[in-house]
């Protein structure tokens, strides 16, 4: 198991192991938020949709390992760290430069390059999650 995947917190029902051979449907969905309830809500929603490779992280400082070259890209990223935090902004910029699919959670931004991203506004319901998942082709 790669250190970046190892350091993240997976929901207990996941049970799977991440390795460099993981790709496509087995690639993890990353839920990056400091809100534990939000992480559980999104994780439960994804599990109901049949996506079981889910990793969560509550501190942006611990997310840098996900960006390492050599790791397979995540299937999708839910990014909820405040963009006023420079480490969060830098991480998001790096992820977007790798062409990762990112959904901003409460992504209130005036920046044109970020306005094009799918956004999930709190409080959200299943219908809102369905809509952003459709926007990213899931």
Image (cartoon, rainbow, N blue to C red):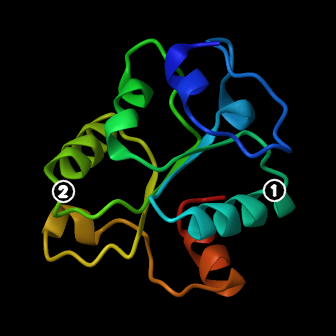
Callout 1–callout 2 Cβ contact below 8 Å: no
Within-10-Å neighbours for mark 1: few <14, some 14–19, many 20+: some
Of callouts 1 and 2, the N-terminal one:
1
Residue shown at the point (78%, 49%) measured from the top left: 51
Q: Is 11 in front, or is 96? A: 11
Q: Is residue 136 above or below residue 69?
A: below
Q: Position of residue 37 (x, y in %)?
A: 62, 69
Q: Is residue 4 above or below residue 134?
A: above
Q: Tell me how far mark 1 sits from mark 2, CA to CA.
A: 30 Å
Judge left or right: residue 20 versus residue 51: left
- State the quadrant of the C terminus: bottom right
Q: Quadrant of residue 14?
A: top right
Q: Which structural element holds mark 1?
A: helix
Judge left or right: residue 8 versus residue 105: right
Q: Position of residue 42 (x, y in %)?
A: 65, 65
Q: Quadrant of residue 98?
A: top left
Which residue position holds label 2?
A: 85
Give me the disc on residue 28.
none
Q: Is 100 in front, or is 77? A: 77
- State the quadrant of the N terminus: top right
Q: Is residue 53 above or below residue 23?
A: below
Q: Position of residue 22 (x, y in %)?
A: 68, 20
Give me the disc on residue 47.
1
Residue shown at the point (60%, 59%) measured from the top left: 137
Q: Quadrant of residue 114?
A: bottom left
Q: Which structural element holds mark 2?
A: loop
Within-10-Å neighbours for mark 2: few <14, some 14–19, many 20+: few
Residue shown at the point (86%, 44%) measured from the top left: 13
Q: Is residue 31 above or below residue 107?
A: above
């Amino acid at each position: 198991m790669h250190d970046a995947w190892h350091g993240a917190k997976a929901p207990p029902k996941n049970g799977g192991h991440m390795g460099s051979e993981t790709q496509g449907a087995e690639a993890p969905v990353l839920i990056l938020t400091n809100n534990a309830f939000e992480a559980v809500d999104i994780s439960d929603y994804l599990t109901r949709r049949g996506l079981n490779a889910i990793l969560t992280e509550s501190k942006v400082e611990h997310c840098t390992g996900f960006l390492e070259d050599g790791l397979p890209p995540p299937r999708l990223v839910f990014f909820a760290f405040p963009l006023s935090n420079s480490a969060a902004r830098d991480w998001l910029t790096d992820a977007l430069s790798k062409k990762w699919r990112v959904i901003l959670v409460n992504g209130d931004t005036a920046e044109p390059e970020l306005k094009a991203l799918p956004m999930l506004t709190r409080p959200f319901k299943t219908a809102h999650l369905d809509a952003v998942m459709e926007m990213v082709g899931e």
